[in-house]
Amino acid sequence: MKTLNQTMTFILAGGAGSRLSPLTSNRSKPSVPFGGSYRIIDFTLTNCLHSGLHKILVLTQYKSHSLNKHLRDGWSIFNPELGTYITPVPAQMNSGDDWYKGTADAIYQNLNLLERSNSQYVLILSGDHIYRMDYAAMLESHLKTAADVTIACMEVPVEDAKAFGVVVTKEDGQIIAFEEKPQAPTTLPNNPDKALASMGLYIFSAELLTEVLRDDHINNDSGHDFGKDILPLLIEDKNVKAYTFGDTQGRVSQDRYWRDVGTIDAYYQANMDLLEPLPQLDIYQKDWTIRSYQPQSPPARTTSGNSGSDGSLVNSILASGVVISGGHVRHSILFQNIHIEDNAVIANSIIFGDVHVGAGAMLRNCIVDKNVKIPDGERIGYDEAQDRKRFTISEHGIVVVPKDYVFT
């Protein structure tokens, strides 16, 4: 589709992700590891890759070194001389003395890059959601409906809708109202238990986007946010359409799985979803493979420990370089280069790369960040009072051991 070459994609990847702390203490939210082999941003970038969108600017700001390194190592796959690129763009105070003040301001401060590209359309994405989606199908819908703006939406339970922007539409999909995190969301006409929530994915014409962002910039009363400030105004006098996620097949089978992994519990559950017998998000689907940087590590293996106990593995995901030496792993996700010693037990947990779990240690319902050496016999996830003295514990009881933590 010719329009793909005329589309600039902005990925918003500068948020602090404070609700995901301490996993975001040393990295931005989009660069948090996910699913044993990936980073969160890999899902958005993969969607762009398979959708045929190859002009991508990743707007970074908060603790971006890890993200920049990941983009360099895993996503240097295009040739700028051919007009294709994935380029990280740090906040540079292009329009004043401020860092990005909101999602709309982040795009505004980089309008020079949009103008230089001569693109006719702009796709605005978030770099911190887990899902698969063919953006080309959404762009085709945008053109077919002659929309000024298209917003990707999905049906969610009413209680969940309180945490999102909720759209109200006519029968033809035209949006007539936008409710930002409403306490009483407007429900679907045919289903009082569900509402239509914005996914934070937008398509604009480049001309309209430039115009509205410049107007917004000089509005001192604006918070410079798409959901709160830009979209409610456009709905009043522009043709703003809803594109319902999952309605159009496109080139990827529609599993209708989309998760905002903005909290520890949401992040943990999205990882655990991958361990279901028939996961809603199938990362093994061959026609929409998730790309990422893969370090050069030896294959994973299990072996007997010093006591003669055989290592065991039940319903878990293992990355390369994992060695289970007589330990036992159940319903867990292990990233690269982890060593599990004799009779250690790991259950319902997520272990990031380069972690060593000592003999007889017991871990359950926890997330262990990178570069941690867990002593022999250590217990995590069994004594809440003791864990709370040392670690962060989520609302639902997930214990988080931070990166480089040293046991004393």
Image: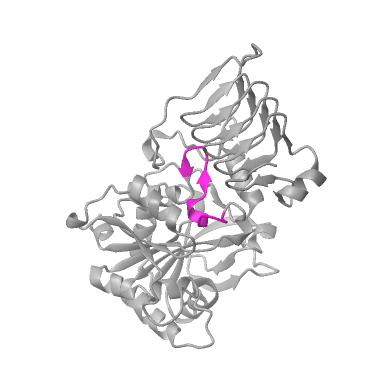
Residue 169 picture location, percent across and down: 53, 68
- Rendered residue at 40%/80% (across/down): 212
Give 82 or 229, whichever is nearer the viewer.
82
- Place residue 114 in its image quadrant: bottom left
For the C terminus, which image quadrant?
top right
Residue 265 visible in the shown view: yes
Residue 399 picture location, percent across and down: 70, 45
For the N terminus, which image quadrant?
bottom left
Above-or-below relation of 235 to 254: below
Q: Is residue 207 magenta?
A: no
- Place residue 309 in its image quadrant: top right
Give 339 or 250, whichever is nearer the viewer.
339
Span highlighted in magenta in the image? 24-38
Residue 218 picture location, percent across and down: 44, 88
- Rendered residue at 40%/79% (across/down): 213
Residue 326 picture location, percent across and down: 62, 18
Scheme of colours in the image: one colour
- Place residue 58 in its image quadrant: bottom left
Which residue is situated farthest in the left direction here?
81
Prevailing secondary structure of the magenta residues: loop
Residue 192 visible in the shown view: no
- Rendered residue at 23%/57% (across/down): 2
- Rendered residue at 40%/82% (across/down): 96
